[in-house]
Amino acid sequence: TKQKDEMNGVVSVQAEHMVGNWKAGTQYPGFEGACYVAAPAISSEPMTGRVKVSQASMYSISIRALKGGAHQDRALAVEINGKRLKTTHQGEGPSKGAFSWEEAGKVNLAEGKVVVKIYPVGKGHPTADVIMLSPVAK
């Protein structure tokens, strides 16, 4: 999976660079990269990607995703190396839809490759843009 390495060990991955059956979209403005991805109406399949972290550390995992718009309850869940984190982007959002960052949780990671998955858990086309893994300052 194509990733972007930021300063201080932060790694981000655009959801459109992950593998899965979610559909690319550009209808809602404010996304990063080329597009965002939205889960099909009746999908439980995750989007999957691999990234490389350069240091062993506790990481804070955040996801930028759409809340609201034509569908409500766009909840999704991030999984890192098999550990499912808390659900984000739950409930109702603005009628025009808006992308926002929410923290999914923290996970301890060893240096090396990390498997990242995004699961659709909401009722209304969960829509993901970017996942960020940020080392927590000690």
Image (cartoon, helix red, strand yellow):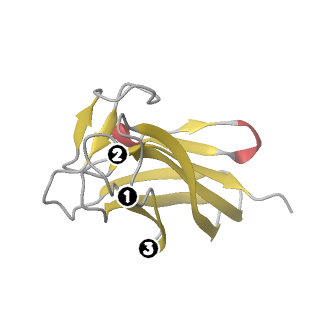
Distance (Cα) linking label 1 and label 3: 11 Å
**Do tag 1 and tag 2 residues touch (Cβ < 8 Å)?**
yes
Q: Which residue is drawn at 71% across and 56% down?
A: 55
- Front label number (1 vs 3): 1
* Residue that mark 2 sits on: 18
Residue lying at the far right of the rendered structure: 138
* Residue that mark 1 sits on: 118
Q: Is mark 3 on a helix, strand or loop?
A: loop
Sequence-first disc among 1 and 2: 2
Residue lying at the far bottom of the rendered structure: 83
Sequence-first disc among 3 and 2: 2
Sequence-first disc among 1 and 3: 3
Q: Which of 112 and 88 is in front in this view?
A: 88
Mark sitting on residue 82: 3
Q: Where is residue 73 in the image (x, y as percent from the top left)?
A: 33, 58
- Front label number (1 vs 2): 1
Q: Which of 122 and 62 is in front in this view?
A: 122
Could you tell me the amino acid type at mark 3? Answer: Gly
Q: Which of 91 and 37 is in front in this view?
A: 91
Q: Report crowding for label 2: few under 14, some 14 to 19, many 20 or more residues within 10 A (C-alpha).
A: many
Q: Is residue 43 above or below residue 25?
A: below
Mark sitting on residue 16: none
Residue lying at the far front of the rendered structure: 95
Q: Residue at x 30, y 41 (%)?
A: 37
Q: In this view, does 44 lie above or below 9?
A: below
Q: In this view, does 24 lie to the left or right of 8?
A: left
